[in-house]
Amino acid sequence: MSGSGEHHGHTHRLELSDQSVREWDAVVVAAEPEVGIVLDRSAFYPGGGGQPPDEGVLLWDGVRTRIVGTRKGDDLYLIPAEGDPLPPAGTAVRGALNDERRTALMRTHSGLHVLTGVVFRDYGALVTGGNMEPMSARMDFDLAEVPADFKDRVAEACNAEIRADRRIDVMTLPRANAFAIPDIIRTATNLIPPEIEVVRIVDIVGLDTQADGGTHVASTAMIGRLEVVKMESKGRGFRRLRIRIV
Ligand SMILES: [Zn+2]
């Protein structure tokens, strides 16, 4: 990945500094049917850190090109829907995200950070894996002993943090400063390649601080309500929590 700061190849990634952008103007840098479309400015989250990519449209010259996915290479490629026309290089386009999907993913992603923050704080358990869809997710934890009512106690603690309406701050820090934050070391040291000099931090103030490239709501109340649907024991110390945001 050639990402550095808020650029990926030729593309300025608008969503990294402003997660509220849903529509914007851009110019096509390159477009090839088999490869995808590269914009000079884009708010399409390309996927990563468990959060699936955005979907949306490009509007140009009275034409609509649906964007159904992304591919990360030297550049950030937007994948058009099969059969949709491609805007040639140099075309001015209006980009627009599928707001319902993006907003749902932001609420879900922030909800997962509340969950991991609560489970680490209350049980000392670390995340070992996970998966995210709009409004539902699963998260795997390494937790040997499961107390009685674990599922309900976790849900209750998460919703208390949501009701507390904690601020969710996003900032970028030089690598050394980021790794000076104790919690960052537990979550990120092994995940961030050494050549990355600036680390983006998502901080649920007072609860959870992580190195994270995803998109988040501005405060925990915007998550809504978090339900722990079920807990599965998949093996020794391997607990899987399935959650839903409502
Ligand atoms: Zn995250």
Image: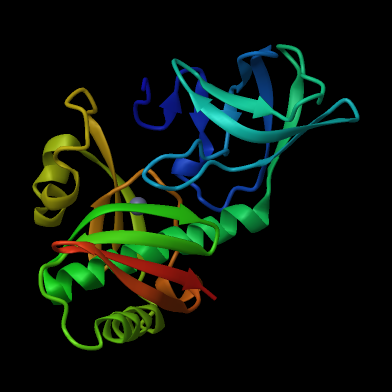
Q: Is residue 32 above or below residue 122?
A: above
Q: Does the rendering let one see residue 189? A: yes
- Farthest residue toward the front? 235
Picture quarter with the C terminus = bottom right
Q: Position of residue 149 (x, y in %)?
A: 25, 88
Q: Is residue 24 above or below residue 3?
A: below
Q: Is residue 188 above or below residue 78?
A: below
Q: Quadrant of residue 117?
A: bottom left
**Residue 76 horizontal side relative to residue 83, left or right:** left
235 or 75, nearer to the observer: 235
Q: Does the rendering let one see residue 217? A: no
**Residue 46 horizontal side relative to residue 150, left or right:** right
Q: Position of residue 3 (x, y in %)?
A: 37, 25
**Residue 44 horizontal side relative to residue 216, left or right:** right
Q: Is residue 54 above or below residue 198?
A: below
Q: Position of residue 177 (x, y in %)?
A: 13, 43
Identify the residue at horizontal 39%, vertical 76% (top origin): 228
Q: Position of residue 179 (x, y in %)?
A: 12, 44
Applied colour scheme: rainbow
Q: How many marks?
A: 0
Picture quarter with the N terminus = top left
Identify the residue at horizontal 43%, vertical 26% (top origin): 7
Identify the residue at horizontal 26%, vertical 39% (top origin): 199
Identify the residue at horizontal 41%, vertical 40% (top origin): 48
23 or 225, nearer to the observer: 225
Q: Quadrant of residue 163?
A: bottom left
